Image: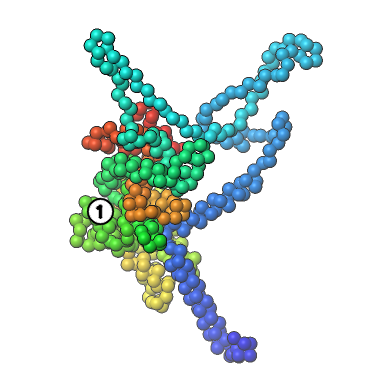
Amino acid sequence: MPYAALPTDLDALRALVLAQHAQIEHLTLVIAKLRRMQFGRRSEQMSAMLGQLGLVLEELEMANAPCAVPAGTATPSTKADKPIRKPLPREEVVLEPAHACCPDCGGALKKLGEDVAERLEYVPARFKVIRQIRPKLACARCDAIVQAQAADRPIQRGLAGPGLRALVLAAKYCDHLPLYRQSDIYAREGVELTRSTLAEWVGQCTGLLSPLVEAVRRDVLAGDKVHADDTPVPVLAPGSGTTKTGRLWTYVRDDRPAAAVAPPAVWFAYSPNRRGEHPQRHLTSFAAILQADAYAGFGALYAGGANLGSGLLCACAAQVLRHPPGAQLPAGGRRLGAHGRTLCGRGRHSWSAAQTPRWQVRQARVGPLLVALRGWLDDTLRRISQKSAWAEAIRYATTRWATLIRYVADGRIEIDNNAAERALRAVAIGRKNYLFAGSDAGGERAAALYSLIGTAKFNGLDPEAYLRHDLGRIAEHPINRIDELLPWNMAIDAGTEPRRAA
């Protein structure tokens, strides 16, 4: 507005400033909403930001790393500066003097002591061909032929051993290396493995491990509580040259925060879209506590139509209280975010079964806060415009209030759904590396292997070693004893049990 057109009356000028301020605030909210629509509002954004921050941190650490010094130069060091290292294999190299006698007088030398210095080195991984030779022996009396039984192969007539197949699976679904990149890496080692060959191995191993994935599914759905969430996965649409959006659903059983002894597990399922029929099919036999976000497809499970009428649907308090994010709301909205952080902070506390019941601790620490928060929300909603984003945020919390506060009266329920969100981080990272799944079948293979790898991680196992262990045994393992190959039930075999991950 030109300076000459400004009103001279003080009240009119104040009204103009307030109107422009309101317009700026409105546009700020619109921009924030459009950004959420473009980039999504789920935890994958935070994972991406953390990934970028990690890269920045690496650069800073490299820039601040001490420069190399000439050999023999003393560098000051204190005990506190020495990092704590895990035990590693040691190889000793003795550097003998160049002279067998004293270079000054020729006298005999005797040992006075020694100086020892260590350095960390990397030995590149290598491929090898194992030739299994089974001699045939004939009896001199009856001509009977005696020969050792052939070793089991993960895939009949397959040339790749369980170790190599486990490496390919872990590299793709744990380290997020697409198969074409793996093919290039193996070529540098002198081994030509085409992408199609690797893809064939992945498909064969997925089929071989399918009974184990089914065992994980049964175990997850046998619990008293399941965390559920989903995330989009681009899938190549055949014949169109474009991608469609599939979904990976995760269902997590993890009662460790409630001091339960049941081992944690995660089961993934794939669907070509996000229709509510998919979680309803996944959870047909489940009739306990479902902790999930506000997606309507989950709510339909407990509407009485499915076999889940006796179950409980519980919301994620952290997700409800941060919608929309407090930084994108006026001062009142930031207050809602502060309430959420206080509730979550008091709701998460160390607890064991030997102490006061969990629900009693929550009612004492969080109950009064929830009562005060609900009164403040209702009072605030009456005093603001019902069309504002601020009112939308309050209604988002109040309409989910019953499912939000259930955790206070039931010690089995968690304050948030972070268990499921953590399980989806691997999918979000992998999606940025391999860009899309090749087909719906590829999405189903990814769900199966994410289930086994995620469950192995939950139980502190190295996923690659765990897959190597199972791939070497599952082909000949009795199907009615498949549970023995689950991470928490594996037999302890010397030299073959997967090591505990750091």
Does residue 360 appear in this view? no
Give the tally of numbered discs. Answer: 1
Q: Residue at x 61, y 31 (%)?
A: 119
Out of 44 and 382, give the one closest to the viewer.
Answer: 44
In the rendered image, the quadrant that contains the N terminus is bottom right
Q: Tell me the quarter of the picture where residue 38 sits.
A: bottom left
Residue 467 screen position, x and y as percent: 37, 38
Q: Is residue 379 above or below residue 367?
A: below
Residue 389 visible to an observer of this rendering: yes
- Residue 68, x across and y down, in percent: 68, 38
Of the pair 338 and 245, the residue shown nearer to us: 245
Q: Position of residue 310 (x, y in %)?
A: 20, 56
Question: What residue is pinned by disc 1?
Answer: 283
What residue sits 56% from the left and 34% below the top?
A: 122
Viewer-closest of 159 and 416: 159
Q: Is residue 434 above or below residue 166?
A: below
Which residue ends up furthest to the right in the rendered image? 104
* Residue at disc 1, secondary structure: loop
In percent of width and height, residue 234 lies at: 40, 58
Above or below: residue 32 compared with residue 301: below
Seen at 64% across and 43% down, the residue is: 65
Question: What amino acid type should be assigned to the residue bearing mark 1?
Answer: Leu
Which residue: 61% across, 29% down? Answer: 118
Label 1 crowd (10 A; few <14 / some 14-19 / many >=20): some
Looking at the picture, the colour scheme in use is rainbow
Q: Is residue 416 above or below residue 258?
A: below
